[in-house]
Image (cartoon, helix red, strand yellow):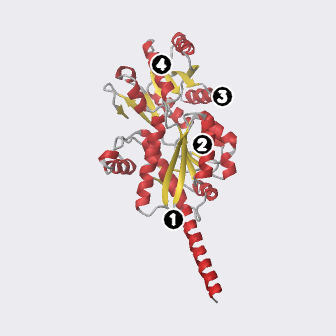
Amino acid sequence: MQETSMRMRYRLALAVVCAASASLAHADWVVAQVAPLTGATAVQSKAYAQGMRLYFNEVNKSGGVHGDRLRLVSADDRGSPEETVKQTQRLLQEAKPVALAGYFGNRNLQALLDSKLLEQASISLVGFHSTDMRVLKAPQLFSTRAGLPEEVEKIAKHLATLGLTRLALVYDERSEDEALTQLVGSLVTASGGQLLAHVPWKAGKQAQEAAIDSLQRAEPRAQAVLVVASSPASAAFLEAYRLEGGAAQVYATSSADIEQLATRLPVELMRGVSIAQVVPNPYRSTNRLNKELRDLLAKQPKEEALSVSYPMMEGYVNAKVLVEAMRRTQPLSSERLADSLRSIQSLDLGGYWVTFARGSQSGSRFVDLSIVNAQGRVTQ
């Protein structure tokens, strides 16, 4: 009798331990980010992560998702595609994330897709920075921002209204440069313009001098230069181009962070530069989304004060979309999350709309243009 009682107590204790272990295993819904957290491109990825954490913290204050807290775990790939794969594999094994988010870099995304890790883990990557249009064909990747075609179209149409029809393209070295030049050429032509030249911006002083020289020697001269490159590459081009007397107006896609450019370059080089933005202006409280972010930042302790920026706003937007999809997924799992993401139609985040149309991995078409004024300030 005593032995039977001891067995019962043992089984009960074992059940309690198992239940506690299961509860502990789901104490947090982990979202994993692998991005350059050190080096020249770290500013954007860190600000993006800050935006995601701001929203996750607010969600946690109100009970989390399905009763469990959200936690962002980040790892540094130092900009290396090999490290992107290595760190993603490590986090998948150790952190057991329900989703990935906030990745950066053309070659990094392509290396991750080539590794087949996303397919093997049945996990989605929600929110990333890449101007490689091929990655949007991957069913495991979901973009919460407008794509490169929407950005280029916005710039081309704006230039047409200004009567600037002669354009040149400068882009960082990539494997699909032909597809990029064809895209830009077709969109410029559709707006009544002409793409006169397309020049890759490569590493090395000699190659960069040759690129500037080819732009300066082109006849007729371009009235505007469209730059599709990272922030460091965009800054290097802009400085070299202006110092060599380049006078054409410079437009860049959102892959160039305007805050970084304004920090790296003097006002006289930045004046008049325009950059496409894929989220609303975070420096204004013109709609509910902007006000929400700014109010959250105002509530942060002074010792934890964060500086508002476009990448922060983008990370905040991305977190809102991801949380909405998680709330729609019951029971929540990485395998089921993709279907919930695809179910999002006309989601209003407060003046910013997200829809994943059938067959599309891009959820937004919002593009605005910001410009640096004579005082070095960012305006619309």
Residue 346 vs residue 114, the one in the foreground: 114
Instruction: Give the residue at mark 2.
Output: 87
Question: Is mark 1 in CB contact (under 8 Å) with mark 4?
Answer: no
Instruction: Give the residue at mark 3.
Output: 175
Q: Quadrant of the N terminus?
A: bottom right
Which of the two discs, 2 and 3, labels the residue nearer the N terminus? 2
Q: CA distance from mark 4 to mark 3?
A: 27 Å
Question: Where is residue 177 drawn, in percent x and y?
Answer: 63, 26
Q: Residue at x 59, y 81 (%)?
A: 9
| Label at residue 24 | none
Q: Nearer the viewer, mark 4 or mark 3?
A: 3
Question: Which residue is farthest bottom?
Answer: 1
Examine the image and state in which quarter residue 24 appears.
Answer: bottom right
Which of the two discs, 4 and 3, labels the residue nearer the N terminus? 3
Q: Amino acid at mark 1?
A: His
Question: Which residue is farthest front?
Answer: 2
Q: Residue at x 41, y 62 (%)?
A: 62
Q: Amino acid at mark 3?
A: Ser
Q: Nearer the viewer, mark 2 or mark 1?
A: 2
Q: CA distance from mark 4 to mark 2?
A: 44 Å
Q: CA distance from mark 2 to mark 3?
A: 24 Å
Q: CA distance from mark 1 to mark 4?
A: 54 Å
Question: Is mark 4 in CB contact (under 8 Å) with mark 3?
Answer: no
Question: Where is residue 190 drawn, in percent x and y?
Answer: 57, 30
Examine the image and state in which quarter residue 336 appears.
Answer: bottom right
Which of the two discs, 3 and 1, labels the residue nearer the N terminus? 1
Compared to residue 218, the image places residue 193 above or below, namely: below
Instruction: Give the residue at mark 4.
Output: 223
Q: CA distance from mark 2 to mark 1?
A: 28 Å
Q: Quadrant of the C terminus?
A: top left
